[in-house]
Image (cartoon, rainbow, N blue to C red):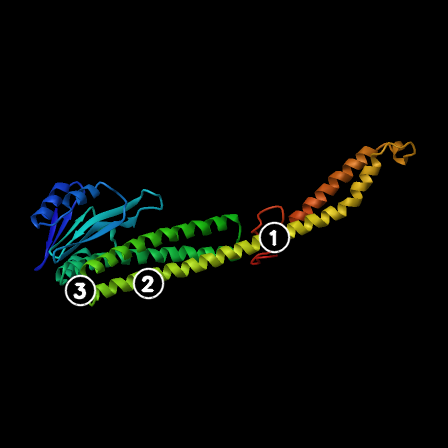
Amino acid sequence: MNTVTSDQWKWYQFDLEEADGIADIIKDYQYPRDEWFCQQLQKENSNHIQVDVIGESELIYGSLIYHKKSFDQKNYDSFHFYITEEFIITAGIDLKILENTNHERMIERMKQAANTAESFFILLGEIMKKHLNGFDQFESHFRELLWEVRHNNNIDVLDDIHKARYDLLIWTNLISSVREVTMGIEEAFHKKINQTIQYQRMCKKIEIGLTLIEQYQKEFDALIKLEEVVSTHRGNEIMKALTLLTAISTPLTAFGALWGMNFKGMPELDWKFGYIYALILIVLSTIAIYLYLRMKGWTGDLLKGRKKNSFFK
């Protein structure tokens, strides 16, 4: 256990295995829900908060997923927190994950905060800063996708678009979780934090994150609609070609039917190489039709055009 002490409050940092120590501190301060909170330490990768009022004292406790190792379902890091007017308890948080944060400076700022809620907002602010930094990498990948759609559009690009859109859902979930905790703290300590600079900074960071998410969602919708239009256009071209080919081949089909009739007076019966000529004609016709379809770009990927930098040609 590590302890950060301020003039008005304390921050107790525990490992997840130290449930007994956490329960003892909660009991020493005569706050409730110590057993329930310790049971929640066994639940990994969960988001939940609870706000209680005990007499004239407010408290909030729960857990927060604050880091994704990868986009696999179980590769997340979460920590548990218990906040009152007198102390903060965190369990399972690894400050090393906040790579771009000066930890000593952050803790010093937390010590200077007027109350526990404002202090915890400083920690949440660093988590939000980490999320916003992650958007820089996401934006770089998204811009590459935009140019791929323009210059090298195919089914693989469409797959990458949907993967990136799924990644955006993960970022949305992470930022929404921070927002939920922020709103819970506001509910519990609203009289003491509404006008504080840390609360206002926290709200602004959340607003930036949600604005970015909304903007990217609109851009993804536009990209997917563009791909749908391209696919529909090429599909219509294929149907048009098949209709034309069917119409053109109708006389040939009729000729073949006549050729197959067994009338006595048929001039082709004496042709020595008649079958060879027929087979050659069939093969050449098939190759010609295939080459025509390939030339039009209808035999492969519907999203891939024949001309570079063109969506429909």
Q: Earlier in the sequence, mark 1 or mark 2?
A: 2
Name the residue: 65% across, 47% down.
294
Q: Is residue 252 left or right of residue 7?
A: right
Q: Which mark is residue 110?
A: none
Circle 3 crowding by C-alpha within 10 Å: few under 14, some 14–19, many from 20: few
Mark 1: amino acid: Arg
Say which element carries label 2. helix
- 1 or 3: mark nearer the eye: 3
Mark 2: amino acid: Ile
Q: Work out which residue is located at the far bottom of the displayed protein and give it.
A: 195
> Where is residue 207 drawn, in percent x and y?
31, 63
Name the residue: 16% across, 59% down.
110
Say which element carries label 1. helix
Mark 3: amino acid: Lys
Give the Cα separation between the discs numbered 2 and 3.
25 Å
Circle 2 crowding by C-alpha within 10 Å: few under 14, some 14–19, many from 20: some
Q: Is residue 137 or residue 178 the one in the foreground? A: 178
* Quadrant of the rendering where the C terminus is positioned: bottom right
| Disc 1: which residue | 234
Circle 1 crowding by C-alpha within 10 Å: few under 14, some 14–19, many from 20: many
Give the Cα separation between the discs numbered 1 and 2.
39 Å
> Where is residue 116 drawn, in percent x and y?
15, 58
Say which element carries label 3. helix
Q: Which mark is residue 191?
A: 3
2 and 3 marks in contact (CB < 8 Å): no
Q: Earlier in the sequence, mark 2 or mark 3?
A: 3
Q: Earlier in the sequence, mark 1 or mark 3?
A: 3
Name the residue: 21% across, 43% down.
40
Give the Cα separation between the discs numbered 1 and 3.
61 Å
| Disc 2: which residue | 208
Residue 295 in sight from this viewpoint: no
Q: Is residue 167 left or right of residue 27?
A: right
